[in-house]
Image (cartoon, grey):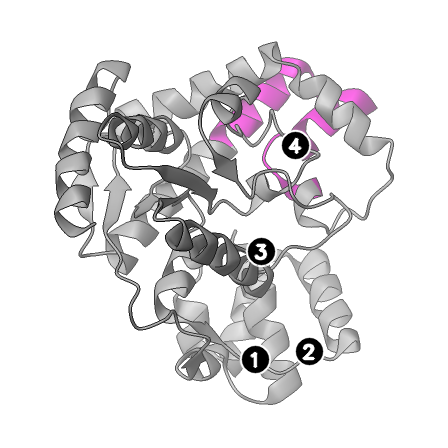
């Protein structure tokens, strides 16, 4: 079972409710993480990872399994998730793969393009160029080499812009050509049932704003302070997570906490909007679940339970 959706949409709560509904019918399930940042053990608060209570009450896997010094990848996650799925299926359990990293869910179903190793010098030059000229100008540079790839990306999508640029510079072929040659596809006997959680836009944005305030109450500042003591490269994914640069700026005295809150909330809303767009286009066959309040979770889980047990 795949459960995708934007940040602060209620995916984790819905997955837990579905898992508990299955357990009541004597059908075991396990929740598997498909969120790139929730893989990192350094950021439990700022990535809104399931609580320790939730993890103790129901099986959760692949949360907090990477160190902040590591650079996670789709390929690395795919290897981990396949092991977990195989183990679950061998025990007769239903894997519930939950997260907002749409590329992870897409790759799990369709396979992974085997792009050759990128020249480290090209990678470093790409990162430096982006930092020097900014996202908009960098996208224009990419468009000269790969107009198709550039047209699909937003100015602020730093990681994917750099990825597309470094691939064509290193291989002389655009990323979309490599992606058309998928490999590492799932076993033929795997069947997927997909759901996308889609609150209304006003509800989603309000959830994003409220969630960051809750993160501050739960110790997000201390979490970032601890992370900064490690002196990690600012280019690592864990250092770019929403809330880390903003709260780091407060510690440096560059911003006030109110400025950091406003910036982080805006960044979260922008990210959630891009996620909504991605899931709308990339998982068109998924069942849409509108969750606008906590009272919507139980009936939505019941609907999902009916669909899942029909195919299980």
Q: Nearer the viewer, residue 228 or 130?
A: 228
Asked if the residue under mark 1 is in contact with the one under mark 2, i.e. CB atoms within 8 Å, the reply is yes
Using the image, tell me which numbered label, if any, was put on residue 115. 1
Q: CA distance from mark 3 to mark 1?
A: 19 Å
- Measured as percent of width and height from the top left, residue 292 is found at 24, 22
**Residue shown at the point (34%, 33%) measured from the top left:** 15
Residue 254 seen by the camera: no
Q: CA distance from mark 2 to mark 1?
A: 8 Å
Q: Which residue is mark 2?
A: 118
Q: CA distance from mark 4 to mark 1?
A: 29 Å
Tell me if mark 2 has few (under 14), some (14-19) or many (20+) residues whose alpha carbon lies within 10 angstroms of its own. Answer: some
Q: Secondary structure at mark 4?
A: loop
List the residue tagged with mark 4: 43
Q: Nearest the camera: 76 or 212?
A: 76
Image coordinates of residue 166 in percent, x first then y, are 63, 74
N-term-proximal mark, 4 vs 1: 4
Q: Would you place residue 195 above or below residue 215 in this image?
A: below
The magenta segment is 239-266
The secondary structure type at the circle numbered 2 is loop
**Viewer-side label of 3, 4:** 4
Question: Horizontal placement of 57 versus 298: left or right?
Answer: right
User: Of the residues under marks 3 and 4, which one precedes in the sequence?
Assistant: 4
Above or below 23: residue 105: below
């Amino acid at each position: 079972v795949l459960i995708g959706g934007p940040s602060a949409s209620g995916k984790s709560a819905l997955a837990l409710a579905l898992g508990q509904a299955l357990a009541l019918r004597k059908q075991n399930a396990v929740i598997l993480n498909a969120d790139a940042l929730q893989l990192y053990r350094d950021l439990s608060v700022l990535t809104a990872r399931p609580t320790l209570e939730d993890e103790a009450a129901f099986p959760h896997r692949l949360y907090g399994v990477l160190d902040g010094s590591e650079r996670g990848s789709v390929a690395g996650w795919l290897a981990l998730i396949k092991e977990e799925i195989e183990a679950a299926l061998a025990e007769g359990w239903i894997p519930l793969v939950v997260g907002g990293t749409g590329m992870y869910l897409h790759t799990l179903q369709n396979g992974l393009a085997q792009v050759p190793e990128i020249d480290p010098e090209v990678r470093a030059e790409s990162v430096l160029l982006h930092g020097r000229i900014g996202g908009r100008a960098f996208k224009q540079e990419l468009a000269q080499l790969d107009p198709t790839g550039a047209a699909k990306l937003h100015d602020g999508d730093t990681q994917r812009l750099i990825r597309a640029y470094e691939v064509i510079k290193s291989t002389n072929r655009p990323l979309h050509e490599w992606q058309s040659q998928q490999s590492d596809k799932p076993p033929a006997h795997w069947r997927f049932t997909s759901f996308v959680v889609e609150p209304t836009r006003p509800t989603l944005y309000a959830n994003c704003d409220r969630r960051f305030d809750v993160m501050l109450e739960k110790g997000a500042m201390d979490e970032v302070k601890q992370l900064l003591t490690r002196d990690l490269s600012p280019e690592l994914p864990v250092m770019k997570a929403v809330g880390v640069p903003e709260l780091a700026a407060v510690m440096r005295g560059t911003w006030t906490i109110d400025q950091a809150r406003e910036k982080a909330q805006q960044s979260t809303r922008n990210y959630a909007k891009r996620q909504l767009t991605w899931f709308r286009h990339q998982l068109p066959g998924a069942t849409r679940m509108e969750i606008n309040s906590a009272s919507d979770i139980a009936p939505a889980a019941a609907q999902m339970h009916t669909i899942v047990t029909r195919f299980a």
